[in-house]
Image: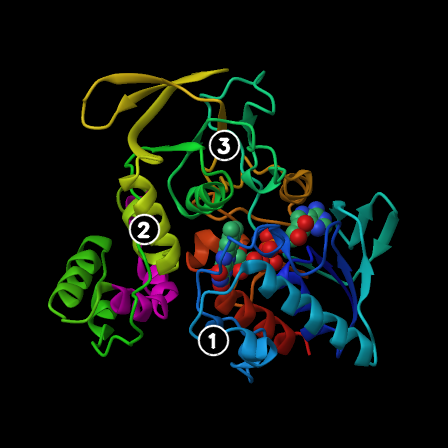
Amino acid sequence: MRIAVIGGGVGGVLAAMRLSSAHDVMLYEPGRLGLGPAYGTASPNHLLNVRAEGMSLSMPQPHDFVDWLGASYDAHEFVPRQVFGQYVQARFSEFQATAENPIRVVTETVTAVRPGFRVSHAGGQDSADAVVVAVGNFPPSSPSFVPSDLGIPYYFENPWQIEPEALAELRSITLIGSGLTAVDIAADALVRFPSLHISLVSRHGLLPGSHAEDLGKCERDLASLLDCRSVRQMTKVLRALITDSDAPWQYGFDRLRLMTQQLWLQLSLADRRRFLRHLQVYWDIHRHRVAPQLYRLIDQAQQDRRLQVVAGRVTRMEVGGLEVHLRGGRGTIKWATDAVVNCTGPGSLARAKSPLIHQMVAEGLLVPDELGLGVAADAIGETTPGVYVLGSLRKGELWETTALRVIREQAYALGDHLK
Ligand SMILES: Cc1cc2nc3c(=O)[nH]c(=O)nc-3n(C[C@H](O)[C@H](O)[C@H](O)COP(=O)(O)OP(=O)(O)OC[C@H]3O[C@@H](n4cnc5c(N)ncnc54)[C@H](O)[C@@H]3O)c2cc1C
């Protein structure tokens, strides 16, 4: 078969490598292969949020990344993300150099896939027997309160596209959002621009938790969660299991991670919606944690009054300032800022800034999931005959589908399925 893999982040690269032993594979990526926004960062201050020992590209060789690192880093360290990117690129180059049937890399953005399949891009059109869509997270789109006429250097819609020196001359910036993206941007700016003042504003004003300082595993058995049939019951049981244990709460969440997909699949659609409305914010700060050194940096900056976190809803935004309705009915405040960065994360499928996704949905090649977060697919990721999806696009159906560990499993499963 001829298989078109669209998107050459780590997910697309892994899928292409797994598929190429049995098929002719074309891999479409306009940017640098294997990196995507996560590992293409120019900043050494951006760290992996998983220890090196959990970041192997190879399922049979779980220590592959640690072996590749050699003596430069320890297996337990949170390594700079750009180093992981170098590892992905090195392994891909080695693969291409020795493969009997190397992958054909096309450095173009795919603009359309028509039934049949015809894959269109600026360089022409290719035909394929199957398509793998591995486009990662959608680029962030602006919240509705952002006026359309605010331009750089005041407003940055995509935090991953800020030029390294763009913030150098500023006295203050405000980040909309307080999740992993905001912490990443804030940490880098704190290190690089010592006189910059940073504000983070989000509905709940909650920051991601820290990974546990000491290493360990939760010995507590979480299997009783599998008997729960509602999100309310699951939350109650999980809270009891974690608080009854002497181990740090992080160990419980690490164990939970391994069964998240199963739990999600057990929930009704109404309960999944309930989770998104009421619990996602708490899930995110416990599940998506930062390296302890990053946590300490942010904590210290708060104590030094270089960084503040505000809980509230932005009601107005204009060049030079913001108006925020504080959480808990504490009134409305205004503050001046030299720039605003959108750190609200990827949005829904309907708002995706991807002409390709909208075209494929319109032609019936991709079927949105019931929550509108991504695409409906079977266990292997097939959404319509011959069209497979990988990674973030499966979020609505699986919830836990963005970490390397899961993407790797999906790429291997697809490779085995299409042998
Ligand atoms: C800031 C950040 C930090 C993270 N840190 C970690 C971590 O420490 N550990 C971990 O396990 N996970 C981490 N993740 C999760 C991360 O999403 C995955 O590890 C992984 O990067 C996802 O890979 P992907 O290939 O699915 O998507 P991406 O890396 O987003 O790659 C998608 C690629 O598709 C390309 N593309 C998009 N549209 C088209 C088109 N129309 N035509 C052609 N190409 C297209 C893009 O150019 C891009 O290169 C992090 C994510 C982010 C955003």
Q: Amino acid at mark 1?
A: Asp
Q: Where's residue 358, x and y in %?
A: 64, 39
Residue 395, which numbered label? none
Residue at image coords 68%, 65%: 13
Residue 359 lies, with reference to residue 219, above or below; the image says: above
Q: Say which residue appears at 23% left-offset and 61% top-offset.
A: 229
Local crowd size for mark 3, using a 10 Å CA cut-off: few (<14), some (14–19), many (≥20): many
Magenta region's main secondary structure?
helix
In the image, farthest residue toward the front: 195
Q: Nearer the viewer, mark 3 or mark 2?
A: 3
Instruction: Note whether residue 389 is visible.
Output: no
Residue position marked by numbered label 2 in the rendering = 285
Quadrant in which the N terminus is drawn: bottom right
Q: Which residue is mark 3?
A: 341
Q: Amino acid at mark 3?
A: Val
In this picture, residue 286 sits left or right of residue 51:
left
* Span of residues in magenta: 250-276
Q: Looking at the image, can residue 151 be seen?
A: yes
**From the viewer's perspective, is the residue at label 1 or at label 3 nearer?**
1
Q: Position of residue 386 (x, y in %)?
A: 68, 61
Question: Tags 1 and 3 in contact by the CB under 8 Å rule?
Answer: no
Q: Which residue is identified by label 1? A: 74
Secondary structure beneath dot 3 equals strand
Distance CA(mark 3)–CA(mark 2): 20 Å
Estimate how packed mark 2 is, as few (under 14), some (14 to 19) or many (20 or more) residues with alpha carbons within 10 Å: some
Specify which label sits upstream in the sequence, 3 or 2: 2
Question: In the image, residue 258 lies at what x, y percent?
Answer: 37, 70
Q: CA distance from mark 1 to mark 3?
A: 34 Å
